Image (cartoon, rainbow, N blue to C red):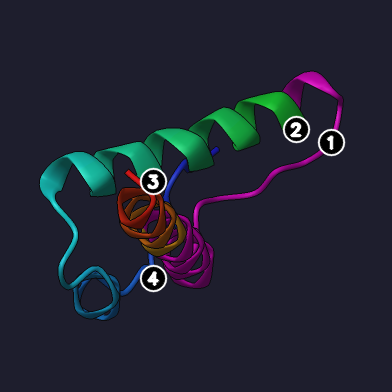
Amino acid sequence: KEIVSPDIDYRKITESAEGLSGRDIEDVIQSILRNKATQEIEGKNPGSVTTDEVIRFIQDSDKARKAREDMRAKSRQYL
């Protein structure tokens, strides 16, 4: 089995990851691989990591990061 799809578009992924640190991107990849491993353990066929899958995880992690930053900023108003 191939873990990463042979037609993955690294340029597209890089463009979607603008503003993220290397650590952020590493966390995204680790999350994807954990999900794939879980699916494999459950007897499912997780397939290879795709461009769209990586971008979706990046977008989700970016939304979560922005939400945390907003919450911190709002909480500082009350201190």
Which residue is labeled 3 in the image?
Answer: 28
Q: Start and end of the magenta stretch?
A: 40-65
Q: Amino acid at mark 1?
A: Lys
| Residue 78: x %, y % from top left | 39, 50
**Quarter holding residue 65:** bottom left
Which residue is labeled 2 in the image?
Answer: 39
Q: Secondary structure at mark 4?
A: loop
Q: Report the disc number at residue 7.
A: 4
Residue placed most toward the observer, 20 or 68: 68
Of tags 2 and 4, which is closer to the observer? Answer: 2
Mark 1 and mark 2 in contact? Answer it, CB < 8 Å: yes
Residue placed most toward the observer, 79 or 55: 79
Q: Amino acid at mark 4?
A: Asp
| Residue 3: x %, y % from top left | 47, 41
Q: Give the CA separation, mark 1 to mark 2.
A: 5 Å
Q: Amino acid at mark 2?
A: Gln
Q: Residues within 10 Å of mark 4 (few under 14, many from 20)?
A: few
Q: Give the CA separation, mark 2 to mark 4.
A: 22 Å
**Quarter holding residue 41:** top right
Q: Give the CA separation, mark 3 to mark 1.
A: 21 Å
Q: Report the disc number at residue 44.
A: 1
Q: Earlier in the sequence, mark 4 or mark 3?
A: 4
Mark 2 and mark 4 in contact? Answer it, CB < 8 Å: no
Of tags 3 and 2, which is closer to the observer? Answer: 3
Q: Earlier in the sequence, mark 2 or mark 4?
A: 4
Check residue 74 for magenta coloring.
Answer: no
